Amino acid sequence: TMDNLQLTAESGDYTFYPNPAEANQNAVSTGGSITDILTALGTSKKATIVLYHNGAANTTTYTVASNADWSAYTNVTFKIVPGAVLQIATGTTTTIPVMDENGLHQRFSYVGTGKVIFGAGAVDFIRPEWFATNTTPGTTDMHVAFEQAIECGYNSGIQTIKLSSSKYYFADY
């Protein structure tokens, strides 16, 4: 459908807003999942997929319940805005082709052994804040977020973990 499409006239690029109510963003559905959007776009049309926060709760969760390798879609940039979270189900891996690196907000939530990796050239660095919100710097336990950031970087071939000027607390160390 065209309900989740916005055409930016000055650039000719497309912006899509997947439906957060989809049970699995990697499943073919009625046109509102990330996979539906990527399939319709193909691998040549330049576009941005925006995971937005609808304000109905503290976070808007976009669930990926099965392995999702979206790395072929290097023409698509993922932008995950503050308050939106891509939740990766246990035992699954989601591969992001290109991501907007701006902002110190949580983007990913792992359930159990779920994980995210980035395709070649997707990002230049990883931030621990992408895996947990440093709600009260110096008090919020960030050790799991650091572990997830390091694992993500290792699995993605990215050697830089970028830190903010914030304080980080590690409860278990």
Image: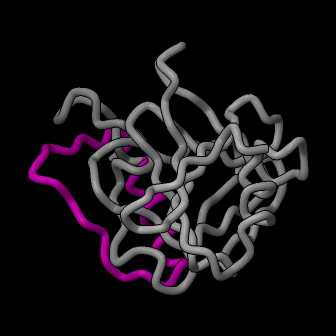
Left or right: residue 135 versus residue 36 is left
**In this view, which residue lies farthest toward the front?**
9
Residue sitting at 55 percent across and 48 percent down?
Answer: 6
* On-image quarter of the N terminus: top right
**In this view, which residue lies farthest toward the left?**
165
| The quarter of the displayed image where residue 94 is located | bottom right
Residue 10 lies, in percent from the top left, at 37, 63
Tell me, what colour scheme is on the image? Answer: one colour
**In this view, which residue lies farthest toward the top?**
56
Residue sitting at 52 percent across and 60 percent down?
Answer: 48
- Asked if residue 14 lies in the magenta stretch, the reply is no
Residue 105 lies, in percent from the top left, at 34, 42
Q: How many marks?
A: 0
Residue sitting at 56 percent across and 55 percent down?
Answer: 49
Left or right: residue 99 versus residue 73 is left
Residue sitting at 41 percent across and 42 percent down?
Answer: 81
Front one among 57 and 114: 57
77 is higher (above) or lower (below) than 16: below
Residue 98 lies, in percent from the top left, at 50, 71
| The quarter of the displayed image where residue 166 is located | top left
Left or right: residue 119 versus residue 173 is right
| Residue range highlighted in magenta | 144-172
Left or right: residue 19 versus residue 15 is right
61 is higher (above) or lower (below) than 46: above
150 is higher (above) or lower (below) than 90: below
Front one among 43 and 57: 43
- Asked if residue 166 lies in the magenta stretch, the reply is yes
Residue 78 lies, in percent from the top left, at 51, 59
